[in-house]
Amino acid sequence: MDKHTKQQIRRAKTVKARWILDDLSTHENKDIRRAVVKNPNVPRDILDRLSRDRDYGVRWEVAVNPSTPVDILARLTRDNHEAVYSALSYNPSTPADILARLIKHERIREYIARHPNTSRETLKKLSRDPDPDVRSEVAKNPNTPMNILDRLLSDKTWYVRGAVARNPNASLNMLNQIWLNMDDNDRNEGEGETWYLKQNPKWDNRKELEKMGLLDTALYAERWLLRSKTR
């Protein structure tokens, strides 16, 4: 890339003048057009035009831009390039209804399950996805209903069960159930779901465990934590 092009890209990302952005948005160089999308001052009509750009990389930038208006994001769900509609699944501004439309695309369900705007209804559907990576993201999502978390505690895949412990809404009862249902060898060796349990600060709350009548489990957990810290 020559020096002049680099200067134009830097200019496209920061310039405020409408007429310059307008001019750069039709530049023959796709990298310059992509840079225009990243400009925080880019007007809506220019974003709209670039969302129809012949280069999918430019459209990708529009799809992932948190400032892109919702109606433009909605239209990009119908884009014919996987990279473009996939970008919507990790745009933090993509609303729940658009994310719900995207679950028909198998390869991006994991990102949708992870998204903070994904609705409870969509998470419910994704909790039965055949891919355990998708189910594990559902288990970690704070929007997931408690009854779904309860069901995922019995999931056939160990790291889906463990992922419930990464959910900030997981109760001590749920953490205890994960612990008690673990394989004895994994529990003794600090493997499997134990890593997930250790990430949850509630698991260190011995007093609460005692109040729940889980003293023996708490002592067992205490020994495991002590052992893991000395390794």
Image: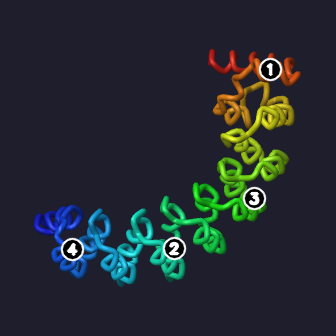
Which of the marked residues, 2 or 3, is nearer the chain's N terminus? 2
Q: In whole angstroms, how far apart are the C-alphas of marks 2 and 4?
A: 25 Å
Residue 182: in sight, yes or no?
no
Residue 136 relative to residue 88: left or right: right
Residue 60 relative to residue 218: left or right: left
Tag 1's secondary structure? helix
Task: List the residue tagged with mark 3.
Answer: 127
Q: Residue at 23% across / 82% down in the picture?
A: 26
Q: Do the residues labelled 2 and 3 touch (CB within 8 Å)?
A: no
Q: Do the residues labelled 1 and 3 touch (CB within 8 Å)?
A: no
In the drawing, what numbered circle is on residue 30? none
Q: Residues within 10 Å of mark 4 (few under 14, many from 20)?
A: many
Q: Residues within 10 Å of mark 3 (few under 14, many from 20)?
A: many
Q: In whole angstroms, how far apart are the C-alphas of marks 4 and 1?
A: 62 Å
Q: In whole angstroms, how far apart are the C-alphas of marks 4 and 3?
A: 44 Å
Q: Residue at 85% across / 18% down in the picture?
A: 215
Q: Look at discs 2 and 4 and give the one toward the viewer.
A: 4
Task: List the residue tagged with mark 1.
Answer: 218
In the drawing, what numbered circle is on residue 85? 2
Tag 4's secondary structure? helix
Task: List the residue tagged with mark 4.
Answer: 21
Q: Residue at 52% across / 77% down in the picture?
A: 74
The foreground one among 207 and 179 is: 207
Q: In whole angstroms, how far apart are the C-alphas of marks 1 and 3?
A: 30 Å
Which of the marked residues, 1 or 3, is nearer the chain's N terminus? 3
Tag 2's secondary structure? helix
Q: What residue type is labelled 4?
A: Leu
Residue 134 relative to residue 214: left or right: left
Which of the marked residues, 4 or 3, is nearer the chain's N terminus? 4
